[in-house]
Image (cartoon, grey):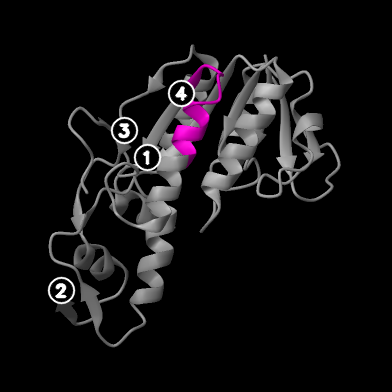
Amino acid sequence: MNILVTGGTGTLGTLVVPELLAAGRTVRVLSRHDRPATDGVQYVRGDLIAGSGLTEALDGIDTVLHLAGGAKGDDTAARHLADAMALAGGVRHVVMVSVIGADTMPLGWFRAKRDAERAIADSGVPWTVLRAAQFHTLVRTMAGKLAKLPVVPDPRGLRFEPVDPREVADRLLALTLGAPAGLVPDLAGPRAYTFADLLRTVRRRPALPLPLAGPGAMRGTRTWEEFLAEH
């Protein structure tokens, strides 16, 4: 199995790539910058938003693990990847990580994720999509910034189920090594928190009162408190 990983140098990529190598797979990472091959990983230069370098990146690849994402442009990146995979002809499985609520949250970033999922599903390549909750690392960064405010917002009814990125990486590894499965059960953390709960665990501040995972969602085991204890 020859695997191309997009977003291979990000939070998930740095966790999944070593596991793929340990499983005996050949790994190529798409990068916007030139990088020398290291630890058995080949890097190829390409840009998903611009749609450049993808033909070369997909040469000889039969599986794609699409982890790349950003504040905007995920839908464009996915369409470029889908078009390139269709032209390459040799890709037999594409795995994508998305976000819980991609099909229900009326916000631009979630809509971009929804459109990215559709682009992958319409690519003609057998696919698997895993929707995950916000990572512990992301929630820590967000809570840390907001906790610096004298008064923090507390959106009533807004709840988080943060999940450890290592558990997401393990799930993605299994999905990548398995057969295409379409949209698989969501992966959320073991506990739900209000926004104020998360902020209080980082730093106490006065709160100004202002989607959970779907039925059948899978649950991780490592809690927000256990993550904080390590960091």
Give the labeled residue for mark 3.
186
Q: Is residue 135 above or below residue 222?
A: below
Residue 127 on the magenta segment: yes
Instruction: Bin the neighbour count of mark 3 within 10 Å (Cα to Cα): few under 14, some 14-19, many 20 and up.
Output: many
Q: Residue at x 64, y 40 (%)?
A: 8
Task: Using the numbered discs, state the Cα–Cα distance from disc 1 to disc 3 in whole angstroms.
Answer: 6 Å
Which span is picked out in magenta?
A: 116-128
| Quadrant assignment for the N terminus | top right
Secondary structure type for disc 3: loop
Q: In this rendering, would 81 be left or right of 206?
A: right
Secondary structure type for disc 2: loop
Res. 88 image quadrant: top right
Please say whether residue 119 is visible from this viewpoint: yes
Indicate which disc residue 210 carries.
Answer: 2
Q: At label 4, which amino acid type do we have?
A: Thr
Indicate which disc residue 132 carries.
Answer: 1
Task: Using the numbered discs, state the Cα–Cα distance from disc 2 to disc 3 in whole angstroms.
Answer: 28 Å
| Quadrant assignment for the C terminus | bottom left
